[in-house]
Image (cartoon, rainbow, N blue to C red):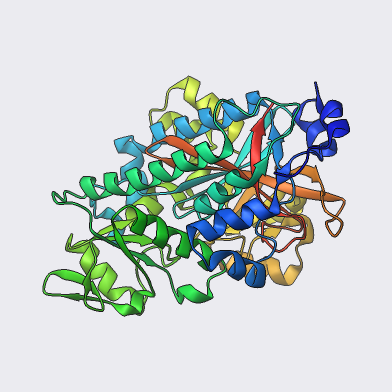
Amino acid sequence: MAEIDQDCALACAGQDAEQLNASCFCAGPELEALENALEAGSPEVAALIGARCPHLFSALPVFASSAQMAQMRDVINAIETVIALPAWHTRVLANAPSIARFDSGVRGVFFGYDFHLADDTVGLIEINTNAGGALLNAALARAQQPCAALDAGPLSGASQADLLEQNIIAMFRSEWSLGDQRRTLRTVAIVDSDPERQYLYPEFLLFRQLFRRNGIEAVIADPARLRFEAGALWCGDLIIDLVYNRLTDFALEQPDSLALRQAYLARAAVVTPNPRAHALYADKRSLVALSDPAQLETLGVPEALRKVLTRGIPRTEVVTPELADELWQSRRQWFFKPVAGFGGRAAYRGDKLTKRVWEEILAGDYVAQAIVAPSARTGGSQDAPDKLKFDIRSYCYAGQVQWTAARVYQGQTTNFRTPGGGFAMVYSV
């Protein structure tokens, strides 16, 4: 590992999270160790990342207070409690695509709860049901040089990464069992549109290798390569047991998704995450109810949980003609997002809006969320901006946090294209 800057380490002692984000430069990934960790996962990954997405890993970690970490866990637990309520299912599924009402029994892998940190509190920005990056963060943990002034915990980065990978395999096997499959999980298809052209394709390679190391044959496939035949889902001459679904065709409505849709509805393959999970968790209109104490009370949510949710989730409104004038006049207070959006696409800060874009928002399906400004991290490399933004992502399964990572960036949304930015380790202070 790289030699620690002892002067910086001494200066870090006793500082809080905000101070460390501004001044700590003694921690970060050791580049050779990171390359070795990626190549151990799959030999071509390091070279592919260097050529395609060189800003995938931040030069420095991020710090959060223990109170903020605890509040994020409380918000996640409260949301899981609400979404388990029969009243929530009735409310959400009544307006969801019909396929969302089909219950295959599985929970859904890699829920991602994305937060901004603000002073002594947090703000949940959105929930994703196919959050990428978990295995990339495992590689980062193996290469991380922790701040010498902090207690990094009882486990080394390598031990934490090993545990995460074990939990990931256990999670997929749990999904297989929940799908009422009684034999051993044998085959997995990692499915996305034109996967080799996806920005996070290097992670697909890591997943394929992880499955194979654990005795599960895995392929990476476009959904058009799949076929539903003789009661089974096929990719070439391989019967697929389980689909790790990275598609943004959340309701499996596109023509290329037909075989996957048929196999899912026939219970011929376990699909995770699936349309039901997306409808229950990730439809951004759900944030309207989750941030409104009156609607939560109507759903039967206890007062203590209502307080957790309304403190931790910024007020969210559906953009309607009735609210158009009010939202336009107060637009600087809002961030506008498409209901079915992902990856920050077609999302706008209100203070950046033009009249033309505003008309497009009114004509589309959008929500407006009260702005919680992201925290800042001082840049840690020569070509990085002086100040970088970051958000915090908690990867969860069955309500349990598996990993907490940061995404460091510059601009309006996370983009993995900022020098010095990318995934970062998170340390609790």
Vertical comparison of 322 with 231: above or below: above
Camera-side residue of 149 and 178: 149
Which residue occupies the foreground of this view, 56 or 307? 56
Q: Position of residue 259 (x, y in %)?
A: 26, 74
Q: Residue at x 40, y 55 (%)?
A: 210
350 displayed left or right of 213? right
Q: Number of labelled discs?
A: 0
Residue drawn where x is 72% and y is 56% of the image: 349
Q: Quadrant of residue 22?
A: top right
Image coords of residue 211 (percent x, y)? 35, 56
Q: Report the quarter where the N terminus lies.
A: top right
Q: Nearer the viewer, residue 182 or 415?
A: 182
Query: In the rendering, at what x and y percent does residue 387 appear?
Result: 84, 49
Q: Is residue 267 above or below residue 66?
A: below
24 sits to left or right of 413: right
Residue drawn at (86%, 33%), measured in percent from left and top? 8
Furthest-left residue in this view? 230
Residue 273 seen by the camera? no
- The residue lying at 64 percent from left, 24 percent from top is 66
Res. 267 in view: yes
The picture quadrant where one finds residue 193 is bottom left
In this view, the residue in front, 78 or 419, is 419
- Rendering coords of residue 291 (x, y %): 54, 37
